[in-house]
Amino acid sequence: MTGYERGRILHRFADLIDEHVEELAALDTVDAGKLFAVGKARDIPGAAHLLRYYAGAADKVHGATLKMAQRMHGYTLKEPVGVVGHIVPWNYPTTMFFFKVGPALAAGCAVVVKPAEQTPLSALFYAHLAREAGVPAGVLNVVPGFGPTAGAAVAAHMDVDKVSFTGSTEVGRLVMRAAAESNLKPVSLELGGKSPVIVFDDADLDMAVNLVNFATYTNKGEICVAGTRIYVQEGIYDEFVKKAAELASKSVVGDPFNPSVSQGPQVDKDQYEKVLRYIDIGKREGATLVTGGKPCGDKGYYIEPTIFTDVKDDMTIAQDEIFGPVMALMKFKYVYIYMRAFPQATSFFFLSFQSD
């Protein structure tokens, strides 16, 4: 199949996604606890946009001819890698599906997708839409199952030519080991982190508080680039804590299908209990709980937006990726804080504005 033909199929695939936005957003809400309004406005339309982007690239992947010497030339030829295994996380089941599948299909690869066991529904629907769009049988395969069985099989299979995994560092090591011990397949890993936000005295305080709130609590903290280590310069620290606590306490936690809700449930019981354990650890290690820190309601896996102050760099809640709505606030005086903020970071956020 030519790149042009692949591009046309991917465009049709994107059109079908646009026709089923509400159903797809509902599946991710039921599976992952994601806000329905956000899925309908961002995640699902974003998937269609991603597909159209890669559809445009499908017939533009070219090699190059190089003049090596007077009577010689060299050339590069770009070919599909073959069968690509994609192990998709549960926090962004739609977005991560298409980050992985879109470029692979555009390049002409066959794909085997192992969605997270917590969130398989939208992946199965996407496989159905792919067939309707004209993706040939056997090109896009979705294999639901658990990590130690289905995921391990994808990583270790001798007929899988490349594997891509997004998830925890612990499981990433297992994927890399399985890939190496099988056919030495190349591996792409994205393994989270513990991203800092650094707020200086000259920052616009209200803007900084709003941005930090967004960085910590987006998707109930279940996002690899969540800014949950908040370093605030001492000149504005006390006022920052006050405003951040006020804003967090206004968050509406509840049914993710309710448009007035700003935070849904954690993805499952295991994650819910893990976050609560980290909150208990924070209190035991001497951090001060300013707001939140408790289950919200008596049903479901809801947790109040939580803020700790008096956090030290060697505390567990400042070191580990919690993957929940927990903010760790730390005070600093001098810019040497940069050196403390680097470890565990996936992304960095710097907030410094000249106030008028």
Image (cartoon, grey):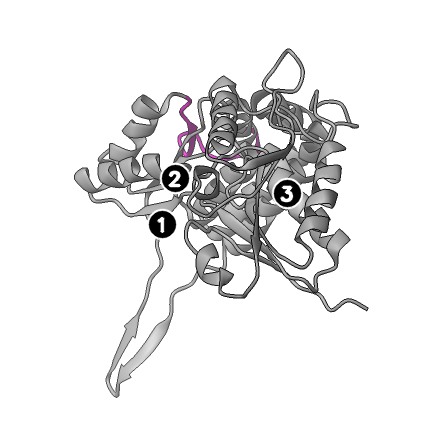
Residue 165, numbered circle: 2
Q: Point out residue 84 in the picture as x, y percentages from the top left corner.
A: 36, 40
Mark nearest the camera among 2 and 3 is 2
C-alpha span from label 2 to label 3: 20 Å
- Circle 2: element type: strand
Q: Point out residue 316 in the picture as x, y percentages from the top left corner.
A: 43, 38
Q: What residue occupies the far top of the structure in this picture?
A: 298
What residue sits 57% from the left and 29% below the top? 129
Q: Is residue 139 magenta?
A: yes
What residue sits 44% from the left and 61% below the top? 339
Q: Earlier in the sequence, mark 2 or mark 1?
A: 1
The quadrant of the rendering that contains the C terminus is bottom right
Q: Which residue is mark 3?
A: 46
Q: What residue occupies the far front of the structure in this picture?
A: 286
Question: Do labels 1 and 3 touch, CB within 8 Å?
Answer: no
- Circle 1: element type: loop
Indicate whether 314 appears above or below 277: below
Q: Point out residue 305 in the picture as x, y percentages from the top left corner.
A: 64, 32
What residue sits 65% from the left and 47% below the top? 212
143 and 331: which one is in front? Answer: 331
Q: Which residues are magenta?
A: 132-144
Mostly what secondary structure, the magenta segment?
Answer: loop
Image check: 83 left or right of 91?
left
Image check: 9 left or right of 354?
left
Q: How many marks?
A: 3
Q: Residues within 10 Å of mark 3 (few under 14, many from 20)?
A: some
What residue sits 69% from the left and 24% below the top? 256
Residue 80, numbered circle: 1
C-alpha span from label 1 to label 3: 25 Å
C-alpha span from label 2 to label 1: 19 Å
